[in-house]
Image (spheres, grey):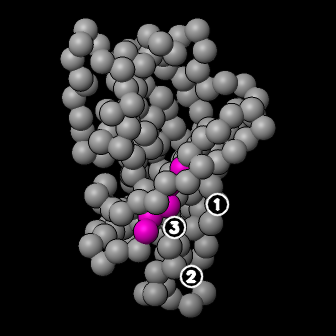
Amino acid sequence: HNDTLRPRLGSKPALDPEQLDSLLEGRWIFTNVWRNIADTPVQRFPLGLADARSSLANFEIRYSDRVGENYFARHSSAHRWFYFPELTKDEVVLLKVWDSRGRDFVESMPCVDGAKAETVPATFTLHSGFDDLATKPGAPDRESIEAGRSHSSDVTSVFSFLVLG
């Protein structure tokens, strides 16, 4: 999955609509920090991350006030997955949740002074807990937290949410 602010913000817009044009001229990035919050290392449902070149299927999400989109990963033997077994609460994983200069989005960005924006390979990081077949019977469930931040030259806001698994 990739994350969305909608459940956290409700009907409040994530960005001031009057600032959208100026924000779209610059680069903006959403990042999350993922961390184990238990005293024991993660043993059940560790966090898996997909390489940015994974095969994606995009789908439309219809809300009462707007239409959005999200992505699913399509199965492919070419996928490269990574995970961090037995993460302790002293370790964190930094995730890029969205980058306006990512290859999946940059074409829809406006030109600034007639120049096309630079492109970076990854628009976001697909990530998910998964059932690790090496998990020992009776291992404790994962307890984790993700905290996120948006970054741009004009606006910085903070949001956080808790994921228990």
Q: Name the magenta segment's main secondary structure.
A: strand
- Around disc 2, counting alpha carbons within 10 Å, would you say few (fewer than 14), some (14 to 19), or many (20 or more)? few
Q: Amino acid at mark 1?
A: Leu
Query: Could you say whether the residue bearing mark 2 is in a helix, strand or loop?
Result: loop
Residue at the spot x=44%, y=10% of the render? 22
Residue at the spot x=56%, y=45% of the render? 69
Residue 137 position within the rendered picture, expressed as x and y whole percent measured from the top left = 56, 90
Could you say which quadrant of the image residue 126 lies in?
Answer: bottom left
Q: Gap in Å between the C-alphas at discs 3 and 2?
A: 15 Å
Query: Could you say whether the residue bearing mark 1 is in a helix, strand or loop?
Result: strand
Q: Tell me which segment is drawn in magenta.
A: 70-74
Could you tell which of marks 2 and 1 lies nearer the N-terminus? 2
Residue at the spot x=50%, y=88% of the render? 136
Residue 139 position within the rendered picture, expressed as x and y whole percent measured from the top left = 56, 82
Q: Which mark is residue 129?
A: 3
- Around disc 3, counting alpha carbons within 10 Å, would you say few (fewer than 14), some (14 to 19), or many (20 or more)? some
Residue at the spot x=28%, y=58% of the render? 53
> Does 102 appear above or below 130?
above
For the residue pair 110 and 72, the one nearer the viewer reads as: 110
Q: Amino acid at mark 3?
A: Gly
Q: Amino acid at mark 2?
A: Ala
Could you tell which of marks 3 and 2 lies nearer the N-terminus? 3
Left or right, 164 with reference to 86: right
Q: Which residue is mark 2?
A: 139
Single out the mark in the foreground, 2 or 1.
1
Q: Which residue is mark 1?
A: 164
